[in-house]
Image (cartoon, grey):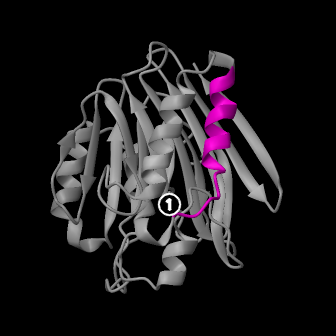
Amino acid sequence: MCLINFAYRVDSSYDLIVSANRDEYYKRPTAPVSFWEEAPHVLAGRDLEKMGTWMGVTKQGRFAALTNFRNPNEQQRNKRSRGELVSRFLIENDLPETYLKRIQLQREDYPGFNLLVGDRNSLFYYSNVENQIKLLAPGIYGLSNHFLDTPWPKVQKGKAGLERCLKASLKGVKECLFSNLQNAEPASDEELPVTGLSLEWERKLSPLFIHTPVYGTRSSTVLFMNQQETRFVERVYEGEEYLEKDITIR
């Protein structure tokens, strides 16, 4: 993922509400969300190049999601795929904090990442760049390609949109969240972060929804989770069209 906005234990109906965009090169092969054949309890999309994933849930109420930490000067050769950080948590049974302590010991094996892992009892955030395991308190959060709640324009817009959508009628929340995720308005140059990319690419990557000739927002996901059920809605984009999968686990 390249943008994850989420409300944790602030809504009366759901413990966790997530709205997220996955940005990737268009040529990278990807499978849409489904239950995995070799791990039928896991519901997630799949990167068919490295066989990991960027976001997923399980029938038992486990959740994980990932963003890359933007550092164009970082050496990535001979490092492990970040997508396995999500898939390993979903497949295995470690408690979230226990899992992150294991990953902390292996943090140099991976390029920079931000990782969210949780279950029905807790939600944690960890970045191998910052190297601090954090138990999250109730609140509305935003995560892109820097640390949690770094006030990049897309993060701020995403959080504000999520907060606005939570005030909509229950039936309208899903469409409100997807509409917010499709905001393609770039930030002004004065608002752009300085991450080591060219000004042209900082502009291209500044909207919530990204579209360039070779790279952009491949899919959007809206997730609703409480103690009784998990609803996972994914839209995979093909030009102006999209394919939607809406799956509920009870």
Q: Position of residue 34 (x, y in %)?
A: 65, 44
| Residue displayed at 18% across by 58% down | 104
The answer to whether residue 28 shows anywhere in this view is no
Q: Does the magenta stretch include residue 186?
A: yes
Q: Where is residue 171 in the image (x, y as percent from the top left)?
A: 68, 18
How many numbered discs sit on the rendered protein? Answer: 1
- Residue named by callout 1: 52
Q: Is residue 117 above or below residue 30?
A: above
- The relative height of residue 223 versus residue 206 in the rendered view (above or below) is above
Image height of 65 relative to 185, above or below: above
Magenta stretch: give its range: 172-187
- The residue nearer to you, when weighing 185 against 37, is 185
- Whether residue 10 is visible: yes
Residue occupying the point 73% across, 39% down: 245
Dot 1: within a 10 Å radius of its alpha carbon, few (fewer than 14), some, or many (20 or more) residues? some
The x and y percentages for residue 52 are 50, 60
- Left or right, 239 with respect to 25, comes to right
Q: Which of 160 and 145 is in front in this view?
A: 160
Look at the image and tell me in which quarter the C terminus lies.
top right
Hey, which quadrant is residue 232 in on the image?
top right
Which element carries disc 1, helix, strand or loop? loop
The type of residue carrying mark 1 is Gly
Q: Main secondary structure of the magenta part?
A: helix
In front: 57, or 190?
A: 190
Residue 84: x %, y % from top left: 42, 60
Please state if 240 lies on the left or on the right of 185 as rendered: right
